Image (spheres, grey):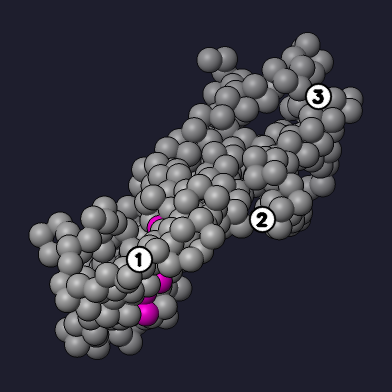
Amino acid sequence: MRILDRYILKSVLTITFICIGTFLFLYIIIDIFSYLEDILKYKVTWQTLIKYYTTFFPSIFVQVCPFSCLLATLYTFAKLNRSNEIIAMRASGISILGISKTLIIFGFILSLAIFWISDKYVPAAQALNQSLKYEMSDKNKKLEKQKETIVNLAMYGMRNRLFFVNKFTPYTKTMENIIILEQDSHQNITKKIVANKGIYKDGFWVFYQCITYEFDTLGQILNEPRYAEEEIMPFTETPQEFLIQRQKPESMSIAQLNDYIWKLSKSGATTVIRNLKVDLYQRYTTPFTTLVLILLGIPFSLRMRKRATGVSSLGISIMVAFLYYVLSAVCIALGKGGVLPPVISASLSHLIILSFSLYLIMKLP
């Protein structure tokens, strides 16, 4: 690596990690003061607090890294430009690409790292964060949370099954007032199961006061409904899978989200599937926001000649990041509204900003 590359990379790395550390520190301080009364009331230990706030590291890193890199790019290049070092580099025959090559490679590597962290560590950290939050509360609250009842739960299961559960208690693995509809490939109902209660025992669902209806292709009931006081149901869905239905897509790994979409694809829920596909493609494109914003920051920073470099960098980075996230939100909304295909809606903002950045770089003198 050239001395010039090390010089630029050192400045960018320093500013980037100072920004990340500052954002993390501010978040923790604000959160501690928000819950200080509960922390003192329930006598939360330092070990639990440290473990609890450590779980914020992956998600905060993923969220603030693009903005931190944009600010570092603007500050570093604007400072070089203000001190006429960029002019000296250009006069010695180094192109804009040659000056920013190391920074672009750094952005690409960091984007891959963000992709890996957001898929491998962020979902697990969020789950651990919620678990620790319950531990930090008193025993009565924890017991109430464990025995919490989920009302009006709907789930798309295997073999085109639709589950409608009036009450589901994860703590006791119990469902009440259950309706299950089985459909064929044309979304015609072939079977309906109604049960008063269901309990998950030894890997199987046991339904009580269960009535099963069979239907033909015209929707007419075949034979007499079959009643069973107690019946073991051949369902593969576990209580954990019912809980996942409440889990937000951002708290799932890519593998879990893929599996969930595959299960829903058997149900014909086109709107839900389309929204989840947008979220899935976002998981692939969002990490590269860091690289895109670095490329966008290069032409802006090379046009800055003011003395107040730091203040100018902060102001421009806020404006640029705001415009980028507005454009991204509009594209995602269009995708979830069915106006754009999911893969286009998740990547369109990146393509627009990338094209705009390259255009501005090419226009630099």
Query: Does residue 274 appear left or right of residue 122 in this picture?
Result: right
Quadrant in the rendering for residue 342: top right
Q: Nearest to the eye among marks 3 and 2: give it.
A: 2
Q: Residue at x 35, y 66 (%)?
A: 223
Q: Badge 1 is on which residue?
A: 223
Mark 2 to mark 1 CA distance (whole Å): 43 Å
Q: Point out residue 60 in the picture as x, y percentages from the top left corner.
A: 46, 55
Disc 2, SS: helix
Q: Point out residue 117 in the picture as x, y percentages from the top left corner.
A: 41, 42
- Total numbered badges shown on the rendered structure: 3
Mark 3 to mark 1 CA distance (whole Å): 88 Å
Tell me the chief SS of the magenta region: strand
Under mark 3, the amino acid is Ile
Dots 3, 2 in contact, CB < 8 A: no
For residue 320, the mark is: none
Asked if residue 314 lies in the magenta stretch, the reply is no
For residue 87, the mark is: 3
Q: Badge 2 is on which residue?
A: 336
Q: Which residues are magenta?
A: 161-166
The crowding category of the residue bearing disc 1, from other C-alpha atoms within 10 Å (few below 14, some 14 to 19, many at least 20), is few
The crowding category of the residue bearing disc 3, from other C-alpha atoms within 10 Å (few below 14, some 14 to 19, many at least 20), is few
Mark 3 to mark 2 CA distance (whole Å): 47 Å
Q: Quadrant of the C terminus?
A: top right
Query: Does residue 200 appear left or right of residue 80 in this picture?
Result: left
Under mark 1, the amino acid is Asn
Query: Does residue 302 appear left or right of residue 231 in this picture?
Result: right
Disc 3, SS: helix
In the displayed structure, 339 sits above or below 221; it is: above
Tell me which numbered mark, 3 or 2, is placed earlier along the sequence: 3
Q: Residue at x 33, y 55 (%)?
A: 125
The answer to which of 193 and 102 lies nearer the viewer is 193
